[in-house]
Amino acid sequence: MASIFSRIALGEIPCHKVAESEKYLAFLDINPLCRGHVLVIPKLETDYLFSIEDEELAGLMVFAKKVAKAIDKAIPCKRVGVAVIGLEVPHAHIHLIPLNSLYDIDFKQPKLNPSAEELASTAASIRNAVE
């Protein structure tokens, strides 16, 4: 059975896309830790990040770097943090999270519940900053 991220990559489930290439996709987390929290995935479903072939993993990281630079331009923050947890969805993914403090990347904190309009606006801001 396809993961929710595979279904998003296939267009079966809508998302707030910020960047896309032939092999990778970046979209907003709908339950973010903070505004601008983005998920970056390979389109090819692989359960565990470190099971991805080296060339694909390198490509994923280069793609994530491009997205992180866009987040940094679009969302006021000191840095863009990176987290890989990989337990919640059986599809490799990277969290890119705008940081102003170490607490901003604490997954125990309450998640935000942005409106569809807020998500669309944030996605557009990041998308417009992608080079």
Image (tube, grey):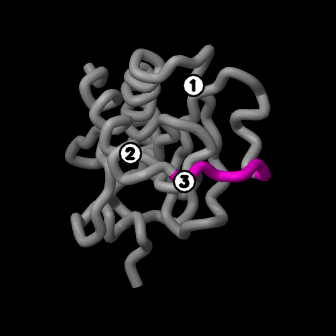
Amino acid of disc 2: Leu
Q: Which residue is mark 1?
A: 80
How many other residues sit within 10 Å of disc 1, few (<14), some (14-19) or many (≥20)? many
Q: Gap in Å between the C-alphas at discs 3 and 1?
A: 20 Å
Q: Is residue 24 visible?
A: no
Location of residue 46 in the rendering, given as x and y in whole percent from the top left corner: 46, 64
On-image quarter of the C terminus: top left
The overriding secondary structure of the stretch rendered in magenta is loop
Relative to 60, say whether 5 is above or below.
Answer: below
Apparent side of residue 121 relative to residue 69 in the rendered image (left or right): left
Q: Compare marks 2 and 3 and give the one earlier in the sequence.
A: 3
Q: Nearer the viewer, residue 54 or 69?
A: 69
- Residue 55's quadrant in the figure? top left
Q: Compare marks 3 and 1 and give the one earlier in the sequence.
A: 1
Residue at image position (37%, 47%) is 27
Apparent side of residue 10 relative to residue 116 in the rendered image (left or right): left
Residue at image position (59%, 38%) is 34
Residue at image position (78%, 33%) is 103
Q: Nearer the viewer, residue 56 or 60?
A: 60
Q: Which residues are magenta?
A: 108-113
Q: Gap in Å between the C-alphas at discs 2 and 1?
A: 18 Å
Q: Is residue 54 visible?
A: yes
Q: Which residue is mark 2?
A: 119
Helix, strand or loop status at disc 2: helix
Location of residue 98 in the rendering, given as x and y in whole percent from the top left corner: 57, 28
Q: Which residue is mark 3?
A: 113
Contact check, label 3 and label 1, Cβ < 8 Å: no
How many other residues sit within 10 Å of disc 3, few (<14), some (14-19) or many (≥20)? some
